Every structure is written in C-alpha cells, then in structure tokens.
Amino acid sequence: MGISRRNFLKGTGLAAGSVALTGKPAKAEVDSPEMRTKGLTTTTTVCPYCAVGCGMIVHTKNGKIVNIEGDPEHPINRGSLCSKGSALFQVANNERRLTKVKYRAAGSDKWEEKSWDWALDRMARLMKETRDRNFVKEEKIAGKSYTVNRNDGMTMIGTAALDNEECYLLGKFARAMGVGYLEHQARI
Ligand code: SF4
C-alpha cells in the first residue's frame, strides 16, 4: 500500500504525541552508549587506514573486540569516523581474516603455512641481500668522488598508523640500511 505525504506526517505526529503523553523514553535513550559498553575494557587507538589519523575507542571483553567507535576527545575527529573507519570492527572480527603466515614460493600455486620466526628470518635475509647487492659506496659528480653509502635497491614507506615514535624508529632504521627513498603514505 502506498503512503501519501499527508498520511506520513499524520502518522509521525501521532507517534511523537504518544511519547510526549506517556512519557516513555525512546528506544535510542534506553540503548545508550554507556549501557552498551558497561563493564568492558576501554583502549584508545588511531585508525590505521588513512593519514587523517582519527582517534578511536576500542572496547574489549575477555580479549575480544566487541565495539569500536570514534573518540569524542580526539582533537582530529572529535568522535566522528568515515564509513571506512566505522567498519574497522569487521577487520578484527572476520572469519576471513588471516591470522597465520602464508607463503607461496615462486612458481608455486600453493600457499604453505609458516611460523613467524621463519618469516622474520627470511625477510631479514632478503633485506640484507638486497642491500648488499645494491649498495653504492661512492659516486662521481663532476669528476670528483663522494662517499654516499646509499642503498639504491630498496624503498621504505610509512603508514598512517605509525605514531611519532614509530616514525622516528623507522626513519633511523631506513637510514641505517642506506635507504634514500623514504616516504610516507600521506604524500602519495
Ligand atoms: S576514520 Fe576514515 S578519515 Fe578517519 S583515519 Fe580512518 S579512514 Fe581516515
């Protein structure tokens, strides 16, 4: 059955009037944020998606995330989140989320499950090999040799989820590896 504009306004007016007369609270008031998060552990964090860096509050129960929402005290977003940030809960609680290291060897069509120790050793070895293979000790400019100690085979990029201290450490690590191509996601 179609509903005319007149009937719709009449219906909503009646509903509002009945709440005013009975004094019964609306459902939204009963289902308040305080009640939904009562007894849960509260932790603040920063959205990992983009360089805006919105503040978030994460609620956990027995180590499991049960709610994520914007942090009203955060100076950047003051409680608001975009649609992507609002859906972060689904990243943590998702049966399709990978929780173990998967490795597919070159040329293979199969994924193998590996340990973190194996993965970290392999990454460290490949980084060292790449650095050694591409290390430039000296460069000649206008006929004169200069020490540059530069790693031309590698680049590093920081994400929006890094805080100041992590950015500092990543910058130090990159320079220790001789990396000159050091960037941040926000500039791309
Ligand atoms: S909530 Fe949206 S705008 Fe804010 S940091 Fe996350 S992705 Fe960026």
Image (spheres, rainbow, N blue to C red):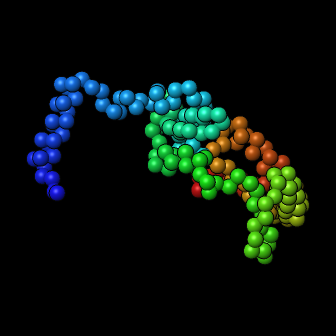
- Depth check: 185 or 144 in front? 185
Asked if residue 16 can be seen in this view, the reply is yes
Question: Relative to 49, is 153 above or below?
Answer: below
Q: With 45 as the anchor, is 75 left or right in this view? A: left
The residue at the point 15 percent across, 53 percent down is 3
The residue at the point 66 percent across, 36 percent down is 63
Q: Position of residue 65 (x, y in %)?
A: 60, 39
Where, quadrant-wise, is the N terminus in this rendering?
Answer: bottom left
The residue at the point 84 percent across, 48 percent down is 176
The residue at the point 51 percent across, 30 percent down is 37
Where, quadrant-wise, is the C terminus in this rendering?
Answer: bottom right
Q: Position of residue 80 (x, y in %)?
A: 45, 38
Quarter assignment of residue 98: bottom right
Q: Position of residue 170 (x, y in %)?
A: 75, 45
Quarter assignment of residue 27: top left
Number of marks: 0
Question: Relative to 71, is 183 above or below?
Answer: below
- Depth check: 163 or 73 in front? 73
Asked if residue 120 can be seen in this view, the reply is no
